[in-house]
Amino acid sequence: MTTDTTLSRPDLVDACVPLAAGQPTHVVRHQRTKVASATQASHDGLFSPAVAGIGVDERLAAALLACRLSQAPALAAHYRGALLDQGGDAAAWVAAIDAGQWQARLPPRLATILGFTAKLIERPIEGDRAAAQALLQAGLTVPACVALAQLIAFLSYQVRLVAGLQAMVAAEAGGAAPPAAPAQGQVPDQQGAGSLAPSPLRINGFTDESLPWAPWLDTVQLEDATPEQLAALDEMSPTARQQPYFLLLAHQPEILLHRSVAFNAIMFAPGGLPRAERELGATVESRLNGCVYCTAVHAQRFAQLAKRNDVIAQLFQDPATAGTSARERALVGFSSVLAQRPHQLAATDVQALAAVGLAPLEVLDLVHAVALFAWANRLMLNLGEPVLPWAAAAS
């Protein structure tokens, strides 16, 4: 099949919501310019013909299946059209995916790719070493495996971003007018002082203590790293060169670079939602996906910023009832729907946030944080595993 089709649009997310210039939600979205730009750049990089070892057509087939399983019709229509534009066997591939018969009707290599896709989209907690090894056995190189995992994880983010923006548009049409945001970095008073329980918390298999993470595939060795790989690592964080997770993702440096820009802009941009509440959204997504590693990291960060961990203990116990205030319960409830049922997110979910004081930019920041960890969790759960202290103690 050909692989020289231009896949990008001026802004795919805007097109799929859809958003028009000057529309209130469009204006709010593009206040986070770095996030919007990095999101589109991630899309373009993930479908670039320059990514070796896995065809553009195979990546588009994975994208179509991911968006169908996620019940994201606008995105599915985009990827279906882009796949059909590839020619060759694309029409047969689309027909098999649309009919839900891809396991029986498609070539073994593609069926393996799509099986990996389905698991990451629907049951990321079931990711294991065997699934990663199956990709190698199907003929993918380690860098191609990383590209595929990044693609599927990115699609999980993209689906939730579009769903969140669509709900904001629906609330906008309903005349929702949230109040102004609190001052930068200020946690609203109604959350109260809260409490800081002794750490580590260990509840239902989750913890807030620091955990190592071990990859299932070979990582980039620093002594052999290219300048592009080193630059992508350094964009992420000062410690990324020492972390196996980022050394594995560095097999695809351009994709890692754009992801790093998006990550830092989403979690650390000034103004908008207080940083502690972004960490809370990330923790909710991670807890619901069963990602023990990400849950631990962002539970810690919430406690550091908020100076309490009472809501974290509640999340570990039962996300359905977590929250120490009306605002927190609304944040957790919205994050839970976006995490588990993005296709069901509605104007009422946005209006519930407005009712407890969130302004549109704060809502967008929460959407970004939750969607980002749909991306991060799927990489953590399907490319390696945390080293759990209680498991080590028992062995």
Image (tube, rainbow, N blue to C red):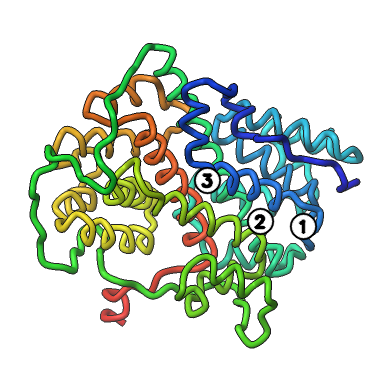
- Residue at numbered disc 3: 35
- The answer to whether the residues at label 2 and label 1 have Cβ atoms under 8 Å apart is yes
Residue 267 at what x, y percent from top left? 40, 52
- Residue at numbered disc 2: 148
Image quadrant where residue 383 sits: bottom right
Measured Cα–Cα span from mark 3 to mark 1 = 27 Å
Residue 54: image tag: 1
Instruction: Report the mark closest to the observer, 3 or 1.
Output: 3
Q: Earlier in the sequence, mark 2 or mark 1?
A: 1
Q: Toward the viewer: 240 or 2?
A: 240
Residue 55 seen: yes
Which amino acid, by three-letter code, is at mark 2? Answer: Leu
Label 3, residues with CA under 10 Å away: few <14, some 14-19, many ≥20: many
Residue at 44 percent across and 24 percent down: it is 167
Quick one: which residue is furthest to the front in this view? 183
- The answer to whether the residues at label 3 and label 2 have Cβ atoms under 8 Å apart is no
Residue 329 at what x, y percent from top left? 21, 36
Residue 203 at what x, y percent from top left? 20, 59
Q: Toward the viewer: 349 or 128?
A: 349
Q: Earlier in the sequence, mark 3 or mark 2?
A: 3
Q: Secondary structure at mark 2?
A: helix
Residue at 37 percent across and 54 percent down: it is 290
Residue 115 seen: no
- The answer to whether the residues at label 3 and label 1 have Cβ atoms under 8 Å apart is no
